[in-house]
Image (spheres, rainbow, N blue to C red):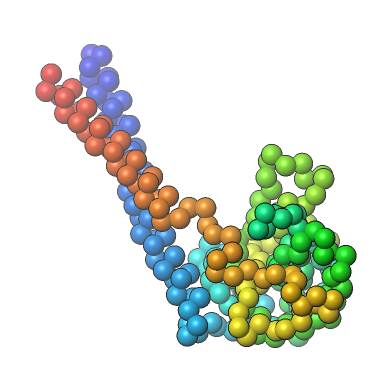
């Protein structure tokens, strides 16, 4: 009786492991296609679609995350400073609001500024960004190990939308400005170098890369094989 019960339990665990293996394998294949597309986007001859802000906000965030687009608009006065280390130095990411002629608005991570340069950055209000190249990003989430009362440590789309009375759909995604050869010069009058936009080598990559999915796939595959072998041995006894 105990052997039958144990065989049943092992069968359930094995089926679960096989399902997890199959799911991770499909995610692995999807991740490979996604990363291939990300790599191709940064090639000089790759066309980047120009889209209106309303069209960008209407996209499926999960499907279009990490996709490059171009858009145009004017920056509001509002800036949210997000604490972030870069190149081993403390600094702030400057997140603003870009509006177009139809008054549609979207949150944009304009780039990073070292802490000692923050007081040299002038107001961005009224700055025109034409053909800005940017990457569509999913909402960030707070680090549970960090006291959020001390500083902003993530791009808080909910807070930005609330303080600026933006529509709910503006909390589904934001744009991360990407530096290109066609980037407009002199975004800020005080210092052309800052804020530093993201580049292919510096933009924050997805946590679950193809290699991670592959590792999970092999792990669950190994568990499935061990489960099948254990069940065969139990049946033979």
Count the labels in the image: 0
Residue 56, position in %: x, y?
A: 62, 74
Outermost residue, left side:
236
The residue that appears at 84% across and 70% down in the rendered structure is 121
The residue that appears at 42% across and 60% down in the rendered structure is 31
Outermost residue, top side:
1
The residue that appears at 53% across and 62% down in the rendered structure is 62
Would residue 192 be seen by someone viewing this image from the given angle?
yes
Residue 203, position in %: x, y?
A: 59, 64
Name the side, left or right, on which 209 lies relative to 92. left
Would residue 23 be seen by someone viewing this image from the given angle?
no
Residue 170, position in %: x, y?
A: 70, 66
In this view, the residue in front, 207 or 15, is 207
The C terminus is located in which quarter? top left
Residue 124, position in %: x, y?
A: 83, 75
The N terminus is located in which quarter? top left
Q: Quadrant of residue 148?
A: top right
Name the side, left or right, on which 94 lies relative to 174. right
In this view, the residue in front, 167 or 230, is 230
In this view, the residue in front, 173 or 155, is 155
The residue that appears at 54% across and 82% down in the rendered structure is 48
Name the side, left or right, on which 33 lies relative to 87. left
Against 39, residue 114 (above or below) is: above
Against 216, residue 74 (above or below) is: below
């Amino acid at each position: 009786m105990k052997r039958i019960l144990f065989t049943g339990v092992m069968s359930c665990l094995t089926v679960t492991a096989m399902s997890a293996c199959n799911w991770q394998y499909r995610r692995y294949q999807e991740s490979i296609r996604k990363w291939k597309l990300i790599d191709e986007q940064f090639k000089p001859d790759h066309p980047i679609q120009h889209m209106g802000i309303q069209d960008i906000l209407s996209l499926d965030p999960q499907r279009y995350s990490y996709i490059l687009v171009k858009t145009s608009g004017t920056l509001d006065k509002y800036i949210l400073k997000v604490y972030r280390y870069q190149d081993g130095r403390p600094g702030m990411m400057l997140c603003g609001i870009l509006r177009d002629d139809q008054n549609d608005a979207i949150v944009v991570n304009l780039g990073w500024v070292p802490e000692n340069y923050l007081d040299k950055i002038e107001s961005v209000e009224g700055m025109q960004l034409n053909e800005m190249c940017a990457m569509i990003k999913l909402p960030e989430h707070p680090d549970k190990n960090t006291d959020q009362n001390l500083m902003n440590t993530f791009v808080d789309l909910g807070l930005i939308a609330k303080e600026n009375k933006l529509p709910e759909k503006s909390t589904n995604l934001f744009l991360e400005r990407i530096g290109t050869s066609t980037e407009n010069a002199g975004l800020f009058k005080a210092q052309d170098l800052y804020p530093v936009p993201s580049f292919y080598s510096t933009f924050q990559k997805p946590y679950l890369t193809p290699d991670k999915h592959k590792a999970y796939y092999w792990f669950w595959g190994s568990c499935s094989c061990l489960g099948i072998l254990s069940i065969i041995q139990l049946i033979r006894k």
